[in-house]
Amino acid sequence: MVATAFTVTTTTTAGVTVPAAASVDNTNGNSFVNSGRELIQITNASAGAITITFVTQNVYTTPGGVAYNIADLAVSLANATTRAYGPFDKTLFNDANGLVQLSYSSGTSITASVISLGVS
């Protein structure tokens, strides 16, 4: 299963038009390119709360060499609510392709857009 990629809009000092939010892919999840300067804005227009899971891609290794998986970040988003999440630490959240992977407990009436803070 390949996650559906979100298009990332990068800000500029002159300003950019933020495109309309896209429907999420509840079946395959979504991904976006992450430089460590991105945020994702998610709107839940459904009748109930959902859980959004941001997948962690790394482990913590103790000085003794014992590796521990880091739990995924699961957040709740109430119905009729819009919230922004980020930035995402590259070491913790980026997969081998530099992408943040996320999934949803429900994709009904859920939209999102990704914005990257540009460099001036």
Image: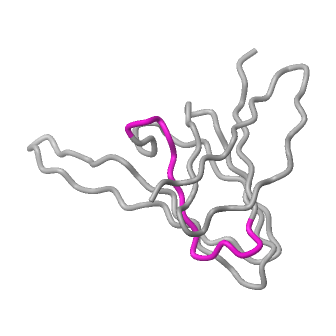
Quadrant of the frame with the C terminus: top right
Foreground residue among 119 and 65 = 119
Residue 42: quarter of image: bottom right
Residue at 51% across / 57% down in the picture? 54
Residue found at the far left of this picture: 64
Q: Position of residue 112 (x, y in %)?
A: 73, 56
Residue 116: quarter of image: top right
3 sits to left or right of 119: left
Q: Position of residue 22 (x, y in %)?
A: 76, 55
Q: Is residue 21 above or below residue 65?
A: below
31 sits to left or right of 115: left
Residue at 62% across / 72% down in the picture? 76
Q: Is residue 22 above or below residue 75?
A: above
Q: Position of residue 3 (x, y in %)?
A: 52, 54
User: Is residue 9 rendered magenta in the image?
Assistant: no
Residue found at the far top of this picture: 120
Residue 70: quarter of image: bottom left
Q: Is residue 23 above or below residue 66?
A: below
Residue at 85% across / 43% down in the picture? 19
Foreground residue among 92 and 29 = 29
Q: Which residues are magenta?
A: 96-110
